Image (cartoon, rainbow, N blue to C red):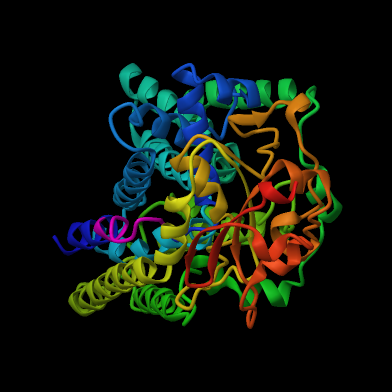
Amino acid sequence: MTYWAAVVAYVAALFRAPLLPLVDYPQHLAMAAIVRRIWTGDAAARALYETNLLGYNSLFHVLVAALGAAMSIELAGKLVVAGYVVLSAFAMLQLLDAAERPRSRALLLLPLVAGYAFALGFVNFCLGMSVQLIVLARTLRALREPRPSRRSALITAALALVAVYGHVLAVALVDTMIAVALVSYAATTAARRASLRAAMRAAAPLVPSVVYAATVFVLQGATRVQDDVYTLEEGRAVRLATKASELLRFASGMRADRVDELVVAAAIALVSIAAVVRRPRDPGAPQEGLWRGAMALAMFAAYFALPHVFFASLFIYQRVAVLALLAAFLWAPAPRPTFERWLDGGAMLVAIGAAALFFQLHGAARRELADVDAAVSAAPPGRRVVGLVFEPYVPSFARRVLLHVPALYVARKPGEVAFLFDTRSLPVRRRPERRVPLPPFFELNPQAYDPRAPYAGYYDLVLMKTPPRVADPRAAFGPAGPSLPVLARHGAWWLIDTSPAR
C-alpha cells in the first residue's frame, strides 16, 4: 500500500506545474506537436518538416501526438510521462519477483524513477527503458519455466519491439543485462545442456527487436542526417574517480540542494545492511543465482567504461547509473527474518521521503516557471521564435531546466523555433531546403546572437531571459532596438518583436 501511494504522489506531482521542469522535455513536446500537425494536414508544418516514424526513439512522440486528438499536447505529454512512472514501478516489482527478492525492496528502488536521465528530460529514453525492464523481468522468469508458452513469448517479443521503438540505447543497455544474465545462468547452472536450452528459449523473443533495431540503424546510416557537432567529443574519457564520486548524482540529479542524493544513499545503506545480515544459504542448494551478481558487475563495468559521448549521443555513462544500482539491489540477498521488519520500516521512510521531495519540487516548479509560462502564452501564433536564455537555471533545480524552454512555443502554437530537430533517430526533421543556419551550440551560447545575421532576420520574435543587471535588453538589437515592441514582460522574461528592425 505504501509503495503504490508513493507512486500516486509521484504521478500527482507531475500535474502541479504547467510545465514539467525537465531540460529536453519542451523539445520532445514540440516534436510531438509537429507530428500531430502533420497528421492533421497542416500545410505549414508539412512544408517545414518531414517525419521519420519508421525508426526508433519515437514512442513518446507518437503516443503524445495520438492523444493530442482528444486533449492538449501538454496534457498528453504529462499523461505519457505519468505512464513511464507507473510502468517503472510495475517493472521494479516484476524484477524483484523474477530475482526472488523481497517486494518491499521496491520502496528503495522508487527514487531511481527520477534519476539523471529523467531530470535531463530524456523522456523517450525513460519510456523505452521502463518497457524493456518489464522484458528483462519476463526473460528472467522464462529461465525457470520448464517450457514457456507461445503466448508468453509473443507478449515478450511485442514488448521488446515497443521498447526499441521507445529508445534504442535504453534497450541496448537493458539487453546487456539480459545477455549477461543468460550467459552466466547457462554457464554456472549444474545441468549445462538443459540450462543452455532454457537460456536460448528465453532469448528467442528478443530476436525480432534486435533485427528491427539493426535494420533501422543500417538504413538511417545511409542518410545525410546527424548533428555531428557532438562527435567532436566522441569517446572522450572521464576519470574513474570522477565517475565514482558522481554515482549518486547520476542516480538522482533533480534537486539543487542534492537532498535526493541523500535519499538514494539511504536506500543503498539499507540494501547493504540487508546483505550483511543475509539469510543463511542452504549448503545443499545448487549455485544457480550467480546471474544476479553478473548483471550488477556488468552494469557497473559499463558505467565506468562507457564515455560521455557515443555515436554522437550525449550523457551515455550517466544513464547507466540507475541501471547499475537497480542490478545491485537485485543482487543483494534478502535479510534474516529478525531484521526484515526494521529494514522494511526504513524502506517505507525512504519511499515516503522520496515522494514528498518530488511532490514539493514540482510545487517549486509552479512558482519558478510561472514567468516563462506567461511569456510563452503571450506569444502570437504563426511566428518564428528565437530563444536567448542567458540564465538557464532556477533556484530549486540542479539542471538547466530553462535551456530548451523556447521550444514550448511550438508545442503550444503553430509556428517555428530556432532549433533544427536534425538528428538521425528523432521522429521529426527540418526539411533540408528550409534550414536556417544557426551558430554552433547556439542555445548554450546566447551571447553569439548577431542581430545583423540572416537568422536574426528570419526569427523575428525573441523570447529572452535577460542577463543579470540588464534593465532593458533591446539596446542589443541595434539602433532601432530601444523602439522595438515588447509584446510581454514577466520578471526576467521578455518577448520582443524584432520584425520592425528588419
Q: Which quadrant of the view contains residue 23?
A: bottom right
- Residue shown at 73%/51% (left/top)? 501
Task: Looking at the picture, tell me which residue is in the foreground, 21 or 123.
Answer: 21
Percent x, y for residue 102? Answer: 26, 60
Q: Position of residue 172 (x, y in %)?
A: 60, 40
Quadrant into which the N terminus falls: bottom left
Q: Could you tell whether 427 is left or right of 343 in the image?
A: right
In the image, what residue occupies the spot 75% across and 33% down? 435
Q: Quadrant of residue 77?
A: top left
Please give the name of the residue rendered at 55% of the width and 19% of the height, measured from the top-left corner. Answer: 43
User: Where residue 244 sits: x, y (%)?
Assistant: 64, 74
Q: Position of residue 237 (x, y in %)?
A: 80, 63
> Which of the pair 361/35 is nearer the observer?
35
Residue visible at 78% across and 63% down in the picture: 479
Q: In front here: 502 or 333?
A: 502
In this picture, is 81 found above or below 392? Answer: above
The span shown in magenta is 12-20
State whether residue 171 is above or below residue 401.
above
| Residue 347 in the image: above or below residue 320 | below
Secondary structure mostly seen in magenta is: loop
